[in-house]
Image (tube, rainbow, N blue to C red):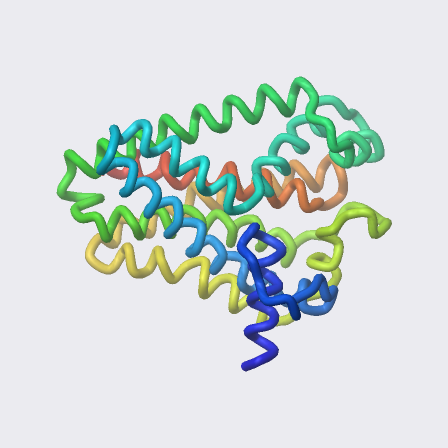
């Protein structure tokens, strides 16, 4: 149990800016095992984002509350996944060979592709979250309570993180050196990492689908997006990097929101 707690705090320290006990360090072995808790980190981020939204929605307007909710999630993760998305936009937008793409993604500066991609990503996320909130105010089918809305926030973050970390289980790490801080995650995994990731990634969706089985359908577009992203990464860089995982998480999170809205409109 003590070891599992240490592994969880390793995941919390690596994927968020939340303070952890001083005894927790970047142990490569624990960091490798911490992938099982990556979707669980999504529970925490989803709860915080929802809590901030509720506070500012009570004080101000839903749209402003959504912006503060997005700010909270970015601050909580240190823009970890958004940065990965921007790097992927720069790398795959400006590079035409594996070596060039990897070099561009490693550069800490954000270029035109990354800047434009990040702006469009955040605008799209704001719009779909705004639409999702309007659905919660006008629908008795998909979202009929604040608890359901909380579960939607949690599921968006846990399922998208499951989609991202599952690439580790099916593809090879692209960089041949140890230049990335995500390298230890890619070295090896056991059935515990796979089972843990899928358990924490799917449990919120299972709870959400208890009274509305149609919600399980959102898995299809989310993992379809994951499939095409992983295939794209494989085609160009023979695998993935930590930036690719961050980009996958961001894209799949938005795909989840869009899928819920589509369910409300067409089912």
Viewed as shown, does residue 128 lie left or right of 2? Answer: left
Q: Is residue 266 visible?
A: no
Quadrant of the rendered image containing residue 26:
bottom right
Furthest toward the bottom, the residue is 1
| Residue at x 43%, y 41% (from the top left corner) | 221
Q: Is residue 243 above or below residue 147?
A: above
Q: In x, y percent, where is residue 74?
A: 51, 39
Foreground pick, 222 / 53: 53
Q: Is residue 51 above or below residue 266?
A: below
Q: In x, y percent, where is residue 79?
A: 57, 39
Viewed as shown, does residue 253 lie left or right of 233? Answer: left
Q: In x, y percent, where is residue 111?
A: 70, 21
| Quadrant of the snapshot with the N terminus | bottom right
Q: Is residue 3 above or below residue 186?
A: below
| Residue at x 31%, y 30% (from the top left corner) | 130
| Residue at x 66%, y 33% (from the top left corner) | 88
| Quadrant of the snapshot with the C terminus | top left
| Residue at x 60%, y 58% (from the top left corner) | 13
């Amino acid at each position: 149990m003590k070891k599992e707690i240490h592994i969880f705090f390793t995941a919390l320290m690596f994927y968020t800016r939340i303070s952890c006990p001083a005894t927790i360090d970047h142990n490569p072995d624990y960091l490798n095992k911490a992938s099982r808790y990556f979707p669980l980190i999504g529970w925490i981020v989803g709860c915080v984002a929802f809590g901030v939204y509720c506070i500012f929605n009570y004080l101000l307007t839903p749209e402003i509350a959504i912006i503060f909710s997005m700010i909270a999630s970015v601050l909580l993760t240190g823009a970890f996944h958004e940065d990965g998305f921007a790097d992927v936009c720069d790398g795959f937008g400006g590079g035409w060979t594996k070596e060039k793409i990897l070099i561009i993604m490693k550069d800490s500066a954000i270029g035109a592709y990354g800047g434009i991609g990040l702006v469009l990503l955040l605008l799209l996320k704001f719009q779909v979250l705004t639409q999702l909130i309007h659905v919660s105010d006008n629908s008795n089918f998909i979202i009929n309570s604040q608890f359901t809305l909380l579960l939607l926030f949690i599921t968006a973050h846990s399922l998208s993180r499951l989609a991202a970390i599952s690439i580790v289980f099916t593809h090879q790490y692209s960089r041949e050196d140890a230049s990335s801080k995500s390298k230890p995650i890619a070295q090896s995994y056991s059935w515990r990492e796979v089972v843990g990731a899928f358990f924490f990634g799917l449990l919120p969706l299972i709870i959400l689908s208890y009274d509305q089985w149609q919600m399980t359908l959102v898995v299809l577009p989310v993992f379809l997006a994951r499939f095409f992203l992983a295939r794209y990464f494989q085609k160009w860089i023979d695998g993935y990097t930590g930036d690719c995982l961050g980009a996958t998480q961001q894209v799949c999170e938005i795909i989840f929101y869009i899928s819920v809205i589509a369910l409300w409109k067409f089912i």
